[in-house]
């Protein structure tokens, strides 16, 4: 993905209310984001099979990456341990064409997030 923008978003669990709203918001934002040269990647600790069902059910046009051990989420400071259960926190990272993190969202409102990312990418690209 080097050479283009990436919206890397972590989310707790496939097919749950907040995660579905957030994923569908990104789904609806994909045409505008791709027109700006942005690729969307979703990451959770769910497995590949769950991701496939979730993506099919909601027609998600972007990859969902399986991080079952939470290693990637941990590297981004986005892993929450609930006893033996490990889930990703709802965080998003905008990565610039040079591979640098340009913006981090630690407090995400799922129903507004897709539009917020579009607006922020527009600002970041202009600067």
Image (cartoon, rainbow, N blue to C red):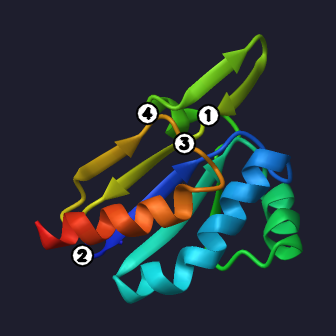
Q: Is residue 48 visible?
A: yes
CA–CA distance between discs 1 and 2?
Answer: 27 Å
Instruction: Identify the residue shown where x is 21% and y is 63%.
Output: 124
CA–CA distance between discs 4 and 1?
Answer: 9 Å
Task: Verify CB contact (< 8 Å) between mark 2 and mark 3.
Answer: no
Image location of residue 45, percent across then percent down: 70, 41
Quick one: SS at disc 2?
loop
**Nearer the N terminus, badge 4 or badge 1?**
1
Which residue carries the number 1 mark?
70
Task: Verify CB contact (< 8 Å) between mark 3 and mark 1.
Answer: no
**Nearer the N terminus, badge 2 or badge 4?**
2
Q: Is residue 97 visible?
A: no
Badge nearest the viewer, 3 or 1 = 3
Instruction: Identify the residue shown where x is 20% and y is 71%.
Output: 125
Which residue carries the number 2 mark?
3
Image location of residue 102, percent across then percent down: 24, 52
């Amino acid at each position: 993905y080097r050479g283009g923008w990436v919206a890397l978003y972590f989310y707790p669990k496939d097919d749950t209310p907040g995660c579905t709203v957030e994923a569908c918001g990104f789904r609806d934002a994909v045409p505008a984001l791709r027109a700006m040269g942005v690729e969307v990647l979703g990451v959770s600790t769910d497995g590949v099979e769950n991701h496939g069902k979730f993506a099919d059910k909601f027609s998600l046009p972007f990859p969902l990456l399986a991080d079952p051990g939470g290693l990637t989420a941990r590297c981004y400071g986005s892993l929450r341990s609930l006893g033996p259960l490990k889930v990703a926190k709802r965080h998003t990272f905008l990565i610039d064409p040079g591979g640098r993190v340009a913006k981090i969202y630690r407090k995400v409102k799922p129903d507004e997030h897709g539009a917020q990312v579009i607006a922020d990418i527009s600002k970041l690209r202009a600067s």
